[in-house]
Amino acid sequence: MFESILAAGLFPISQSALADIARAEQERLETCLIKADTAPSEAYEDSLAWLSSGNRPRARYCNAVALLALDRLEEGAARLEALATAPDPIELEDRHKYLAQAGNAWLAANYPEAAIVALSDALKLNSDSPQVYKDRAAAYLAVERWVEGVDDLNRALELAPSDSEALSLRARAHLATEDLRSAKADMEAALSYEPENIDLLVLRGEIREAIRLAELN
C-alpha cells in the first residue's frame, strides 16, 4: 500500500520540505535575474532548462526577463502578461509587478497601446503606484492622448510630489497643447529638483521659444 502511494505521487510533502523547495526556487530565480544583466544568453538557456523540469511561475518569470534582456521585447512582454493572468497561486503583488514590467516592455518596443492595456491592468491591482501612473502617462503621450496623460501625471505627482520626471512629462504635455503657462511652471519645478539635468534645460529652451513665438502673434 505504502509503495503504491509513493508510485502515485500521493505521499504528503511536509511544510518544511515545501519551504525548502520554495527557497531553492527563489535562489534560482535570483541567480537568473543577475545573469540576465550580465549574461542574458546564458540566463535564457538556463530558463529553458528550468522550464523543461517544471513550468512553474518562477521559471516562466526567469524566461520572460531573459527575453527582455535579449531585446526580444514583444515576446518578453507577452509572457509577462500571460504569467500575470495565469491560474497559478501567484501573489497579487507579483501579478502587479509582471503587468507593470510588461507595460514598460511594450512601451520600449514602441507599442504604446499595448502598454496602456498592461499598465491599466496593473493599476487595477494597485492604484497607488506613482511609477505605473507615470509609465502609463508616457504611453498616453506617445499616442497624443494628452488629457489622459496629464490626468495620470496629476495622480503620480499627488503620490510623489517631487518626481522631476513626472513634472517634465507633464510640462511636455502642456507644451504640446499650448498651455505654456502650465508648461513653464512644471519645467521650473522640475529644474528646482534637478538644476543640471540636460533634458530639462533643453525643455526650458523649447518652452521659452514657444512663449516668444506666442507673444509675437
Image (spheres, rainbow, N blue to C red):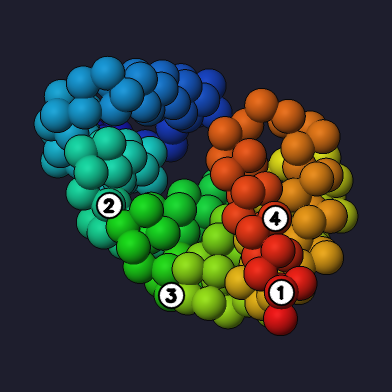
Q: Residues within 10 Å of mark 2 (few under 14, many from 20)?
A: many
Please, what is the three-letter code of the amino acid marked with disc 2?
Leu
Image quadrant occupied by the N terminus = top left
Q: Would residue 121 appear left or right of 29 to someone viewing this image?
A: right
Asked where in the image residue 170 lies, by quadrant, the reply is: bottom right
Asked where in the image residue 121 lies, by quadrant, the reply is: bottom right
Residue 37 in the image, given as x and y percentages of width and height: 32, 24
Q: Which residue is mark 2?
A: 73
Q: Which residue is mark 3?
A: 113
Please report whichever mark, 1 or 2, sits nearer to the chain's N-terminal start. 2
**Quick check: marks 3 and 4 in contact, CB under 8 Å?**
no
Please report whichever mark, 3 or 2, sits nearer to the chain's N-terminal start. 2
Q: Could you tell me which residue is drawn at 41 percent across and 22 percent down?
A: 30
Q: Could you tell me which residue is drawn at 70 percent across and 55 percent down?
A: 208
Q: Which residue is mark 1?
A: 216
Q: Give the numbered dot on residue 208.
A: 4
Q: Would residue 50 appear left or right of 192 to someone viewing this image?
A: left
SS at mark 2 in the image: helix
The correct choice, above or below, for 73 with respect to 50 in the image is below
SS at mark 3 in the image: helix
Q: Could you give the CA–CA distance between mark 3 and mark 2, rounded to whole angstroms?
A: 15 Å
Q: Could you tell me which residue is drawn at 33 percent across and 40 percent down?
A: 65
